[in-house]
Image (spheres, rainbow, N blue to C red):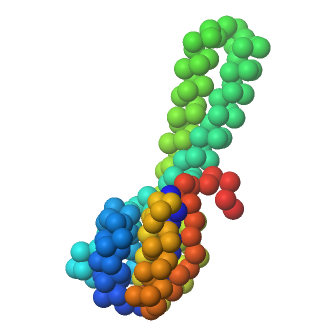
Amino acid sequence: MKQHYYLTDDINSVEKIAEDLHTIDIDDDHIHVVGLDTDAIEEHHLHTARVIDETDIVRSSERGLLVGLVFGVLFAVLGSMFTPFGIEVSGPSLVMITVFIVGLCTYWGGIIGTYFENYRISSFREAIQQGKYLLMVDTEAGQESPLRSMMGKQHPEAKWMGKDSTIANPFHA
């Protein structure tokens, strides 16, 4: 899936766009709005962006997973080569401790991610602070062309700001 980004000044425009998106088979679960006035977004029965869309939970969890894998494998290798404190660690114990390390690092990565803005929407922060609304539309392969066509013809007030994959990239800077 791809996520398309549109900026517009008017919440009424966002509501009309959402209605028109339904006509090309894009449902509410694939339409998210970011704006300062969340009350207005809810009054217009639009879906505000979820915490997972606004924060870096997913990407940070993925990074935590990668760090956990490195430390877990390192622990397993060193634990099988040496006997720390004179205790020989069995294979199942090494596996369980490695899984624990990976899980703990993934968990803490997610916790840390809640403190940071999603890397995808951080470039729109200034426009959002100025009162604009960011509309994020998730599309499947066959929906991209109808979306671009419909938005260009019926909603020129909404400026297309680009698209990205819906899959978080842990290596994105």
Q: What residue lies at 48% left-to-right and 85% top-to-bottom?
A: 152
Query: Going by the image, does 16 lie left or right of 131?
Result: left
Say which residue appears at 54% left-offset and 28% top-offset.
100
The extreme right residue here reads 81
The answer to whether one can see residue 134 in this image is no
| Residue 142 visible in rendering | yes
- On the image, the x and y values in percent for residue 63 come to 62, 47
Please name the residue shown 54% across and 47% down the image: 61
Out of 89 and 53, give the one closest to the viewer.
53
Quadrant of image for the C terminus: bottom right
- Whole-percent x, y for residue 44 in the image: 24, 80
Q: How many marks?
A: 0
Vertical arrangement, residue 17 with respect to residue 145, above or below: below
Position of 166 relative to 84 (above/below): below
Above/below status of 101 relative to 142 = above
How far across and down, in percent of the image, does residue 62 sit?
58, 46
Picture quadrant of residue 172:
bottom right
Q: Residue at x 45, y 74 (%)?
A: 147
| Left or right of residue 54: residue 39 | left
Of the pair 173 and 153, the residue shown nearer to us: 153
Q: Please state if 166 lies on the left or on the right of 172 as rendered.
A: left
From the viewer's perspective, tell me whether residue 73 is left or right of residue 159. right
- Of residues 50 and 117, the one drawn nearer to the viewer in this rendering: 50
Residue 27: quadrant of the picture: bottom left
